[in-house]
Image (tube, rainbow, N blue to C red):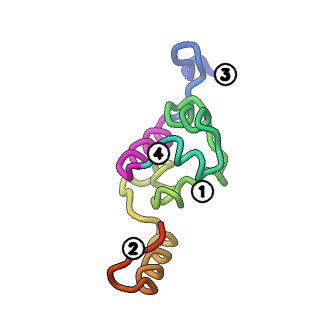
Amino acid sequence: MDPKDVHSGEGRIDPTIGERIMLIRRRRGISQRALAARAQMSITALNRLERGLQSVWAERLATLARILEVSADYLLGLQDDAHVAPRAAIAREAAQETTPPGTSSPA
């Protein structure tokens, strides 16, 4: 392990992904417990990811991006716009078109 990557005795990963997951999760009003359950990961793993102490597999990153309705590029720090990922937007629009007025669409 590179000594530059050590932070308070623990290995530290690039914090961008975790910081962005935490930011969007909080903006969406989703608890760590709820996001961890939906992403099929432990709360401890999500907490460590958000603090930059754990890396994430591509499949899990894609799952988190879909749940949070952002692009994986945003979570990776490759773009600064947290726009809704195209697939999520299309799915949401389709759900709204099939939902009768005055009722809420499924989350």
Give the left or right position of residue 63, taking residue 101 as reference. Answer: right
Question: Toward the viewer: 86 or 105?
Answer: 105
Kindly identify which residue carries mark 2: 104
Residue 10 inside the magenta-drawn segment:
no
Most extreme residue toward the left is 102
Tell me the distance, in whole angstroms, between the alpha carbons under discs 3 and 4. 25 Å
Kindly identify which residue carries mark 1: 63
Q: Position of residue 103 (x, y in %)?
A: 37, 78
Q: Which residue type does callout 4 highlight?
A: Ile
Question: Could you tell me what secondary structure mostly forms the magenta stretch?
Answer: helix
Secondary element under disc 4, as helix, strand or loop, is helix
Tell me the distance, in whole angstroms, between the alpha carbons under discs 4 and 2. 26 Å
Relative to 103, does residue 40 appear above or below in the rendering?
above
Label 1 packing within 10 angstroms: few (<14), some (14-19), many (20+)? some
Which label's residue is closer to the chain start, 2 or 3?
Answer: 3
Q: Residue at x 43, y 83 (%)?
A: 99
Q: Residue at x 48, y 71 (%)?
A: 106
Q: Residue at x 61, y 51 (%)?
A: 39
Which dot marks residue 1? 3
Label 2 packing within 10 angstroms: few (<14), some (14-19), many (20+)? few
Tell me the distance, in whole angstroms, between the alpha carbons under discs 1 and 3. 28 Å
Q: Nearer the viewer, mark 3 or mark 4?
A: 4
Q: Position of residue 53 (x, y in %)?
A: 57, 29
Kindly identify which residue carries mark 4: 21
